[in-house]
Image: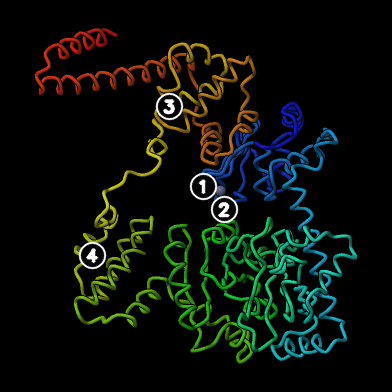
Amino acid sequence: MGSLIPEETIRQILDRVDIVDVISSWVPLKQTGRNFKAPCPFHHEKTPSFVVNPDKQIFHCFGCGVGGNVISFVMQQEQISFPEALRLLADRCGVAIPQAYTAGSSKEKLRDQAIYVCGLAAQFYHGQLVSSREESAREARTYLKARGIDLEQVRKFQLGFAPDRWDVLLEFLRTKDVTLGQMEAAGLIIPRQNKSGYYDRFRNRIVFPIFDKRGRCIAFGARSLDKESSAKYINSPETLLYTKGHHLYGLNWARETISKEDLAVVVEGYVDFITPFSAGIQNVVASLGTALTVEQVRLLNRHTTNVLLLYDSDVAGEQAMMRSLDMLVEEGMNVRVVTLSDGDDPDSFLRKYSPAAFRERLSRAETLFDFKLRVLRLRHDSVSIEGRARISAQMLETVSKFKNAVVQAEYLRQLAVALHLSEEALRFEMNKMAAGPSRPGKEAQPPKSVTAAVPVRPVERDMLRLLLNEQSFIPLTKEVLSVADFHNESVRAVIAKVFELYDKRQEVRVPDLLCCFEDQKILQMISNLIADEQFMTGDTHRFHKDCLHRIRQDRLKMIRQDILRQMRQADQTGDAQKLDELMQEFNRIIKH
Ligand SMILES: [Zn+2]
């Protein structure tokens, strides 16, 4: 997995730690039969579907599908890399990772450095805002005061100020022995055009540090105090730590309340977050300008499936919401939309009205169906048949994304009523959409990974599960079947690895095997197979023989069908000799 830590050490760690023990530090596990259960820490749920199997040392969630061994759990729970997770576990069980490896990969070293440098910069900017006597710093304080942000909030959210000079942060960091390369990697300085030296990225700006969920500063947003400035807000560039659209501002402070209230209010900007949060509405996060991304929704999904979108009531805000809606539905989120009165954003609204009035607005949120329909009706003519067709086409795009057929049917009914269209016609149009868009001028292309799309046949699942549970089945399986006899690509990859390990005379153990794969699909498939309790009772030997037989029969059937197809072809072209050969081959095969 690209780690420098020796395989032997990894195996030692896996031997010493117990998955139940480790996961218990984060999740309250309850024993049920052989397994342990809990509400899943990776998606929001009320009925536990997160299972830990101590025999095979794996975990799996039957709700969201995550799964793997103890290392993958720590990686996902703490959002850290493979070597980082290994080190955490090594500390726990007292395995020494040789000195040469303890620093992890060079990429991690760079990440750690960047976090350290961002932290220093945040402290510096904060100090400037709170205590600098410079005129520009005083202006910054005046500006914040005018926006209703007081010292307490400045402290809580670690707000800062970047002075109106070219290299003040750079010089400060130099005194802390930070190199120019490290400053640039953290996104804090920019090389000069003529390549001689660097200058500070943020100047004469209020600085908002962006924290990861563990509360470490990873990037900055900065608002200009210069009225002439072309960019009101600028952000850190993409760095090792920060990818645009992969974080939610404020999640580090809000996540507990979001889980508790089972609802997240998503706003646009920093101040839209700070004002409601300070007014006691603490289940709020900011998407930072852009429309919500899938990554952001998945961050939320760990805490709740209920989302309230509260964007600025201007065209840009409305468009950002419209763009997010379908994706939110696809990700299985319950979405509602709040629109404030003309021109208001959460910040300005709360300055005019009370938090109670704000909450009241939240409680009157529209369903996304109503919201989208209302916006589309304003945009298109909802009287003419053309206008209504246009509206219905866009509405159906959203409706088609609902996985629940009952919900879908209800929305179709509502749409038919609202647009005076027939329900059957709408359903017909929607089904056409599901069948795939017909792009003019382009041949229908098969999906890119045809092999990956092959569903796992039950018999392949059963066989794989048998091999993972009982190594003694491997030799006979290998004798009778080849990897190619398995149709699903993921199953093939695992079977190939199992055979390979067996050939090397290595023990095939599930936790070790899981370390061989990075593909989440494969990890999930393996953990799913193992965690399923409805299995492995009765005569497994007979069951194994039966699976072998079925897979072999399937192979022969495919060969037979292929020969028959060739025979038809030969017959059509009148190739008698070929036909005869094929016939003989066919007869030979059906004897099996
Ligand atoms: Zn889950």
Query: Which residue has dot 1 on it?
Result: 63
Q: Earlier in the sequence, mark 1 or mark 2?
A: 2
Q: Is residue 127 above or below residue 524?
A: below
**From mark 4 to mark 2, how far is it between C-alphas?**
34 Å
At a point 71% along the width and 91% down the height, the residue shown is: 146
**From mark 1 to mark 2, how far is it between C-alphas?**
8 Å
Mark 4: amino acid: Leu
- In front of the other: label 2 or label 3? 3
Quadrant where the C terminus is found in the figure: top left
Q: Earlier in the sequence, mark 4 or mark 1?
A: 1
- Mark 2, secondary structure of its residue: loop
| Residue 139 percent across, percent down from the top left | 77, 89
| Residue 357 percent across, percent down from the top left | 57, 86
At a point 28% along the width and 20% down the height, the residue shown is: 557
Query: Is 528 placed left or right of 211 in the picture?
Result: left
Q: Which mark is residue 426?
A: 4
At a point 11% along the width and 22% down the height, the residue shown is: 573
Judge: label 1 CB < 8 Å from ligand 1.
Answer: yes
**Mark 4 residue crowding within 10 angstroms, few (<14) / some (14–19) / many (20+):** many
| Residue 145 percent across, percent down from the top left | 74, 89
Q: Are marks 3 and 4 in contact (CB under 8 Å)?
A: no
- Mark 1, secondary structure of its residue: loop
Q: Are marks 2 and 3 in contact (CB under 8 Å)?
A: no
Mark 2: amino acid: His
Query: Which residue has dot 3 on it?
Result: 460
